[in-house]
Amino acid sequence: MSPKVLLIDPVRMLPSLLLPLVGVLFVGGFSARSYLWAALGVAGTVVFAIIRWATFTYEIVGDRLETKRSLISRSVRTIPLERIRGVDVSTPPMHRLLGLAVLKIDTGASGGDEEAELDGVTLQEAERLRAVLLRRTARPETHAPDLAGPGERVIIGVPRRWLLYGPLSGAYLLTPFALAGGAIGLTFQWGDDLGLDQDAAWSAGEWLWDHPYLLLVAVLLLVLAMPFVGGVMYAVFNWDFQLKRRDGYLVAERGLINRRSVSLESARVRGYEIVDGLAERWAGVVRAWAIVTGLGDSETRGQLLPDVPRVVAYQVTADAIGPYRAPLRPHPPVARNRRLFRAVFPWAVLSLVSAVALLATGTVLWWFLLVPSLLLAAVGVPLGLDRYASLGHGYDGVRLAVRSGSLRRSQAVIERRAVVGWRLRQTWFQRRAGVLTLIAGVGAGKGGYSAIDMSEAQGAGFPAEVTPEWLAPFLTSRTPPTP
Amino acid sequence: MTSTGPLRDPANRVSPKAVRLWLLESLFAFVLFLGGSLLIAHWVGGSGWSWVPGWFADHSWTLPAAVVVLLGPFLVTEPFIRYAVHRWELSGDVVYARSGYLTREWVFVPVSRIQTVDKAQGWFERMLGLATLEIRTASHAGSSTIKGLDHHVAAGLAEQLAHRAEALRDDAT
């Protein structure tokens, strides 16, 4: 490890030490003795950091990476290089100032503890290690010559003006509330030390209760801040997003303060998921994730694209992983009735119940239940119709696609060879409607991707079209697969 | 039990003893529910709590009666419907299995994608000489569980699947 990490570790530990230190000072009445104790505490963390740095070593020995830690107990971890599935390099703010990086090595093992982490190597060393670690693993994958070209090629660098789409994604929208909550929590935590007690908190609460419009204004301000703060957070995390191809790996780099670079082995990518929410669909932008086998923390690591225009997303995913070139087939009309029923019925029942209760009791309170449930039932109509419009499935000879969802619509595109099995599910209600749900089992991503409410003919015909050799023995008639 | 449109029924039924297994299992659940409702009825009936509506406190026997009337038909029909639905077949190196009661499932698992084959026996199954075959792939959606097989059938099938899976191993997952 670089010795510069010594500057980071004690500083990072300070926040957790601050409270005990302040406590010591208070208890000691700010006497010389208490300052001595506090100074000892700080010195202790520095010494601890030095010992930790001095006793942690890593080494590439032959075909494996060994990390040794001999602080109190000795531990040696050995990672065979062919096991390494990806390398995740990130530079948190302090590391960045000092030219250091954190290297996380994904071995496909389950559990966070199984990942090796090298915290505080220099940037050059991180680059060198990544090249060494990944080159060894990429070598056996020579059957993909077009992927294994030397050097690197940028597939897309997302222009900064597209960061403006950020607030549409709905990501980080709750940040203002989280910040406010954090601030309140911190006040309570530190309140004791600062001389505030429960009575003070109570009186503050009562004072607020007497001025409800202040509370309302605060909530309104927080709500108004949502898109702005959310947009800023989005921009900070997705700054200068770049997707590159390097030696059989897809490398995604992003971030303004914490620059993060994730490498995904192309040979393990099985497909991709294209996601858009309501607002994003209106603006014509989508996000994309890769579907990768054995990828931990895939929600953040698997991201291929932040919000970009739909056409661009199709080009990039086609270039990086592979195109999907076939229209999606609609599901039968009875599926529309089912989507509508499910979106409207619960709210209709609730409004009926509250209407009856209103008539029976005449309590004004029931209006508060009746009006929202009526509104939600009304909104259910366009929602149900849109859910039906989203349903679709298709196959272009190489990849299959399934799509569903409205508030968060998601289209999964999966390689045919990645399918490990099929599952058809039919509830009692579906049986009466003559539809069923087909789930394609895939040993990557979520594990299964569903096509909801297909007709029974489609449910048997689609798997028979994608994997005819598996289904052939079980079909009653040799009719060609239904389109 | 007719099959879905163009799909034919899997060839083999599970063991007839499986009916007894499902009967035992649903009887077990039934006794639990009935016992629970009797306890509640007993407490509420004798308590005289003010928040309990009068008509219910006076007729607390209606709760266990409702449990019997509502759950009774399920108790009786479930084992036989399950026996009619649960079927399995291995042909063309694909395991095809059907299962379910109110919700039905058809699963197709090609032998080439199988990762592990487990044979498990619960307490009741042990008593009846039955076994459950668990066929796992890299995906939970592509995995299959066949319940209520005769023990020797399950053992033979597990053996056969393990052998074929070895021969056909395809690491595309």
Image (cartoon, coloured by chain):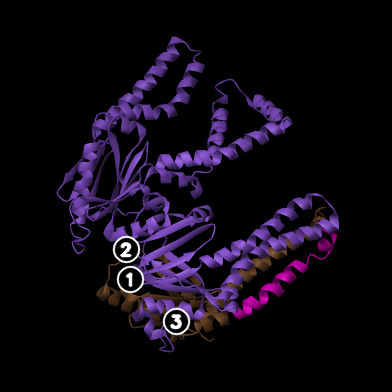
Chain colours: A purple, B brown
Q: Quadrant of the N terminus of chain A?
A: top left
User: Furthest-bottom residue in view?
Assistant: A477
Nearer to us in this view, A305 or A454: A305
Where residue A148 sits: x, y (%)? Answer: 20, 57
Asked if the residues shown at circle 2 and circle 1 are in contact, with their CB atoms under 8 angstroms apart, the answer is yes
Q: What separation in Å lies between label 1 and label 3 (alpha carbons)?
A: 18 Å
On screen, residue A389 versus residue A137, left or right, reads right
Q: Which residue is mark 1?
A: A398
Q: Which residue is mark 3?
A: A482
Q: Which residue is mark 2?
A: A322
Q: What separation in Å lies between label 2 and label 3 (alpha carbons)?
A: 26 Å
Res. B156 visible in picture: no
Where residue A416 sits, quadrant-wise, is bottom left
Q: How many other residues sit within 10 Å of disc 3, few (<14), some (14-19) or many (≥20)?
A: few
Q: Quadrant of the C terminus of chain A?
A: bottom left
Q: How many other residues sit within 10 Å of disc 2, few (<14), some (14-19) or many (≥20)?
A: some
Q: Which residues are magenta?
A: B53-77
Q: Amino acid at mark 3?
A: Thr
Q: From the viewer's perspective, is residue A443 above or below residue A124?
A: below
Residue A27, magenta (yes or no): no
- Residue drawn at the location 41% of the way across and 79% of the way down: B96
Q: Chain of mark 1?
A: A
Q: Amino acid at mark 1?
A: Val
Q: Chain of mark 2?
A: A
Q: How many other residues sit within 10 Å of disc 1, few (<14), some (14-19) or many (≥20)?
A: some
On screen, residue B132 versus residue B2, left or right, reads left
